[in-house]
Image: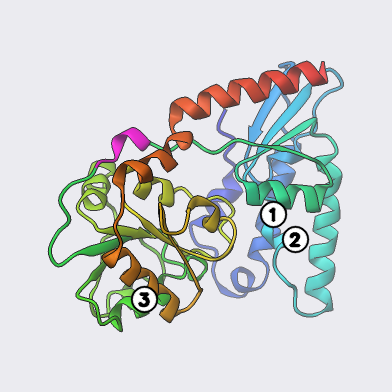
Amino acid sequence: MDAEFPFQSEFHNGMSGWFYRQIPKHYAEFRVGQRFGGLEFDEDVLLSTSTMSKWIVPKYHQSHINYCHVPPPHFYGIPKPGPFEWAKSLGLGVIDQHFTTFVDEIIANSEFTRQRIQRHYRTNSEVLHPPVRVNNFYADKPDSPPYFVMVCRLVPMKRPELVARAFANSNADVRLVVIGSGPLQSKLSEFQNVEVRPGLTDSELEEVVARSIGGVAFAKLEHCGITPKEFQAAGKPVIVPDEPNLRNHVVDGETGVVTAVSEDGIRSGINRVLNGDWNPDRIREAAQPWGREAFQKRARELVQTAVDTIV
């Protein structure tokens, strides 16, 4: 079932003013967790996936396996200024850890998430990469002059402005196509050599990637990352920051470029891609373990192992 709650729509569709600015992230995640905690099921085994679905409280005969995307960053991952913010995050973290004790098995979506689960919940977990449409992406002859692709929500944590600034100030004859929408959309459109294209269909996205020279994925502390594998599925090298989890996607110099989090670092990555001798088949190999068939096979194995251990 898709456990959507009225509060989620209300929150995401535009609470404004003081309330939105001051307490939305902590409060929203707490409310969603509350609603998960109130759900009831009759099945023997529950499989859940989302940040807050760990708050489901199973009945005595039920087993609960959670596919964890990330421990709530606003409870654990972001330094809190001031005693009130610190105490609020501490309290919510304690509640989150309490409900996690009702989960029989946690499966992580990446190595970075696995490390976070170990740190915050003190439990070991296996890694199951999410499914990517690797067979849908393909390579075409790159446009001239060449362009890179960045696919993301246009919000500060994805760092699109830093990437756009690096391209605007690059000496190379190269462009950046940004696919996505968000509050930074109009600002990004002002940069030279940067084109913003919101609202593309899957087939349009695949065509843009096919005719690119490479991709850029530069989010801050990305807990997993899908777009690097989409670029690699098309045989395109991808530029990533030297941070978890994105650096885990790339063998530097073989399937992409790992670089410093700065304009100079991004420009260095651009030049390395433009001047590199890349093997598209080698790059495509890096994406195959993230395909749907690979996901289904490993998911069945992990769930069966978990059930056998629990029962």
Q: Give the residue type at disc 3.
A: Arg
**213 magenta-colored:** no
Neighbor class of circle 3 (other Cα within 10 Å; few <14, some 14-19, many 20+) is many
- x then y, percent, for residue 202: 29, 43
Q: Which residue is mark 2?
A: 76
Quadrant showing the C terminus: top right
Residue under the point 84% across and 77% down? 83
Determine whether, in the image, residue 131 is placed left or right of residue 106: left
Q: Nearer the viewer, mark 2 or mark 3?
A: 3
Query: Looking at the image, is mark 1 or mark 3 earlier in the sequence?
Result: 1
Given contact means CB atoms under 8 Å apart, are the residues at marks 1 and 2 in contact? yes
Element under disc 2: helix
Residue 277 in sight? yes
- Residue located beneath label 3 in the image: 267
Residue beneath disc 1? 72
> Which residue is at the front of the view, 187 or 140?
140
Helix, strand or loop status at disc 1: loop
Instruction: Please provide the residue range marked out in magenta.
Output: 134-138
Closest to the observer, 40 or 256: 256
Q: Amino acid at mark 1?
A: Pro
Of the pair 202 and 117, the residue shown nearer to us: 117
Question: First in sequence: mark 2 or mark 3?
Answer: 2
Q: Badges 1 and 3: C-beta atoms under 8 Å apart?
A: no
Vertically, is 149 above or below 185? above
In the picture, residue 194 is in which quadrant?
bottom left
Q: Residue at x 51, y 29 (%)?
A: 295
Q: CA distance from mark 2 to mark 3?
A: 33 Å
